[in-house]
Image (cartoon, helix red, strand yellow):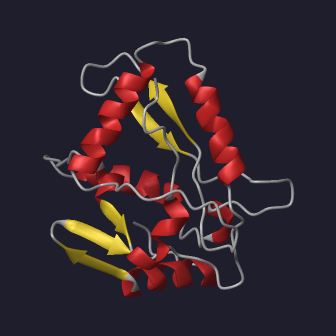
Amino acid sequence: MSNEPFSHLEAGAVDFFKCNTRYANRRYTMQLPFKSDSQTQINFGRAFAQLISLKKSKDPQLFTKYQAILDKYIKEGLIKLVELEPHNDGQMNYLPHHPVLKNSTSTPMRIVFNASAKSGPNSKTLNESWYTGPNLALKIQSMILRFREKPFGQTEDISKAFLRIEIAQEHSDYCRFLFFKDPV
């Protein structure tokens, strides 16, 4: 990467991650990088509307596939079931989600959570409440050039990489999502 210095906000985000990330049991655990002046607004209504829209799908196998993915996440300890608590004290957020389907044998469907969804016209999204960190996309060109300098390159499979990052317990209520106990 180039040696361009980070901006003040970018450096703050990097420092936050260095100080608030732990590695244990083959997983990283981190606090969410909230800006000090930010507070999200509960997104229950938006998440519920997205779930109802999902229920109206014309694909009869959609819920079976969706439930299979969620069951696998529960079995692997990536998500856990909690009681529904739609209170609005700014300490909880519900993420809308939807399926992305593709013609693939390994991952025909994946679930995408939307942290950019607003609960109302003047509300902050979960993404807007966080430090964003440095924009590393600008440094891709130099990375590609360095990769091509050597006769051999190494790549890694980072499938499910983001599922291996655990949210610290004190921030887990910001990443709730809704689904039906019995979607049929």
| Res 28 seen here | yes
Residue visible at 53% across and 69% down? 134
Q: Is residue 92 above or below residue 143?
A: below
How far across and how far down the image is residue 171, in percent?
A: 48, 74
How far across and how far down the image is residue 98, in percent?
A: 53, 34
* 121 left or right of 137 in image: right
Residue sitting nearer the eye, 147 or 66: 66
Residue sitting nearer the eye, 85 or 133: 85
Residue visible at 54% across and 70% down? 133
* 68 left or right of 131 in image: left
Residue sitting nearer the eye, 12 or 161: 161
How far across and how far down the image is residue 52, in percent?
A: 63, 31
Q: Report which quarter residue 164 is drawn in.
A: bottom left
* 70 left or right of 41 in image: left
Residue visible at 80% across and 62% down? 123
Residue visible at 59% across and 45% down? 96
| Res 135 seen here | no
**Quadrant assignment for the N terminus:** bottom left
Residue sitting nearer the eye, 104 or 146: 104
User: How many numbered circles are shown?
Assistant: 0
